[in-house]
Amino acid sequence: MTDAAAIPGPAGAPAAAPELPDILPPVKARRGVSGFAFRHPTLSIGLVLLALMLIVAILAPYLGTVDPTALAPAKRTRAPSADYWFGTDAYGRDIYSRVLYGMRISLLVGFACALLASAAGLVIGVVSGYIRALDTIIMRMMDGLMSIPPILLAVALMALTRASVENVIMAITIAEIPRVSRLVRGVVLSLREQPYVDAAVASGTTTLRIILKHILPNTVAPLTVQATYICGSAMITESILSFIGAGTPPITPSLGNIMADGRTLWQVKPFIIMFPAIFLSITVLAVNLLGDGLRDALDPRMAKRL
Amino acid sequence: MLGYVLKRTLATIPVMAFVALFVFSLLYIAPGDPAAVIAGDQASPEDVERIRKSLGLDRPFVARFAEWSLQVLRGDLGKSIFTGLPVTELIAQRIEPTVSLMVVTLILSILVAIPIGVVAAWRAGGWLDRGFMGFAVLGFSIPVFVVGYLLAYVFALELDWLPVQGYTPISKGLWPWLENLILPAIALGFVYIALIARITRATMLEVLSQDYVRTARAKGLGETAVLFMHALKNAAVPIITVIGIGVALLIGGAVVTESVFAIPGLGRLTIDAIVRRDYPLIQGIVLMFSFVYVLVNLAVDLVYTLVDPRIRY
């Protein structure tokens, strides 16, 4: 600008150029919570919804619930009312209480699977990406594991073990590991070629230190996004497994089990399935929105992809 | 070209071998005693021993695996513990409804998802795009059986447009067959449509910013021709990849959808097998579906070379 002003105009003195209207309105940086919500609407909606669901699950005992496993044969399949907000199931159990306690199981399964699959996938991916000798064999194994449709893999595992929440988590985690390892391996392979990694190698940095200082920090963003998606899909898979009888033990009030109990009565008492379904879907939706929002926020280049 | 087809086909062999090894080893690596789990809590020690013997758990792993592999190669998947019938026979009896459901779902999903994705990319940022993509996120968030019950409740019970449950073989006529499959196919296709629509939109967005698309528009080509002839064709590879990968969702979802709509297919067979802890049957079903999945993705890889002449290996 100073250069342009220094050049004399045709009339000698710098001509008073007509003031150009601003093409873009002035951007006022919004600060604080409202600014964050404005810049990342998807992320914010996801966070708020998930926080809400977490609070509901954690505070389940204090939200007017009764024992979710208490049977009351005289009060079977009551429609939703002031006494039974979501009605009762075929054994007279209060669905409202069961749904709130079921949220705990679903969230536990979701978070545990996301954490475990990310941790295992991270280790396998780094090893595979860094140790050439093992790469081919590990990736062929992952290809094989990925060729088994996840639900069927979980079904096969569950058929051989006793029904328990831990085994459900293990079964879903094993099915999710290959995708995470591939993702991490991809990141590692592309980072290995980076000049700064070459520089670190040349200056005698140990492999362990390179992995810790240069490789791992770069996997955090994609891994976090992937972990949220795993969390969402694990909750869906838990409900599907429990629904077909290969999930958490029937006595556990998981959202899938509540819906499985309503299976035979769905034509006459649809509310038994409806309430847990709404809660499950909102929770998974929250996690998925969080994932989409994180992806866009952590890597703006990816915002237009997917 | 022929060399590539051959190479790619041979490359599926180690993958399938690993799948077989894994599914077989599950019996040995599963925590606890699988024989006792399968026998159930009321089983006598003799029952457990009998099941252990029939599963071959009393013999060394390597010998048993070699024997079993040869069996599988001959097309023998063993015998069901519960019925005593060969697993292949049980699968063959139930395969038609499942294949029908999956094929109808596949066709329906592609026909719905690709236009949605193309239109969303074309109107990126607009309300149509937001609407479609919001719907797609929703698709990932609702379990397939809930969509199934919802559809059955609204369109079969309340509106009475379509049958609630059941299956009619295709030999009884095309419409009776299709009529029973419409609702299950929509339910099963919901996630799949969301998946394909999202990838279509993403790839189309990339392609639409290319120079040749601008050229096509500049020379006065209609928008439909630009979108579907020029752009979609160049966006085909990732879309086809996802269609192939998504078949895993269809397989898993079919098990559940069949249960919701009382379709007597492989899904019902699987659920019965779970209830009876009939592991040889589950093993056979998992193995068969995995092989199908590997072959589908082999086909996808080979299709690449047809849709994209640049890909020549």
Image (spheres, coloured by chain):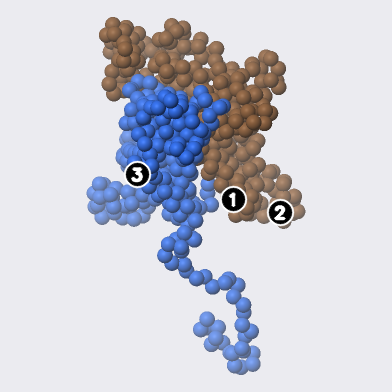
In the drawing, what numbered circle is on residue B130?
1
Q: Residues within 10 Å of mark 1 (few under 14, many from 20)?
A: some
Of residue A291 and residue A164, the one placed in the foreground of this image is A164
Labels 1 and 2 positioned on one and the same chain: yes
- Residue reaching furthest to the bottom: A12
Q: Residues within 10 Å of mark 3 (few under 14, many from 20)?
A: few
Which chain does the numbered disc 2 sit on?
A: B
Q: Chain A rendered in what hue?
A: blue
Secondary structure beneath label 2: helix
Front-lying residue, B252 or A77:
A77
Subunit under mark 1: B
Q: Which chain is brown?
A: B
Q: Tell me residue B201's x, y (percent).
A: 59, 46
Cβ atoms at labels 1 and 2 below 8 Å apart: no
What amino acid is labelled 1 in the image? Answer: Arg
Report the residue at 28% width, 6% height from top. B46
Residue holding disc 2 = B217
Q: Position of residue B138 (x, y in %)?
A: 53, 42
First in sequence: mark 1 vs mark 2: 1
Disc 3 from disc 2: Cα separation: 63 Å
Q: Dot 1 lies on which element?
A: helix
**Tag nearer the camera, 3 or 2:** 3
Location of residue A226 with respect to A255 vertically, above or below: below
Q: Which label belongs to residue B181?
A: none
At x 38%, y 39%, the residue is A65
The picture quadrant where one finds residue B244 is top right
Instruction: Kindly indicate the quadrant of the structure image that contains residue A71.
Output: top left
Instruction: Please give the chain letter of the residue carrying mark 3.
Output: A
Q: Residue A62 has which mark?
A: 3
Depth-wise, is mark 3 or mark 1 nearer the camera?
3
Picture layout, residue B124 above or below residue B175: below
Q: Position of residue B264 (x, y in %)?
A: 55, 17
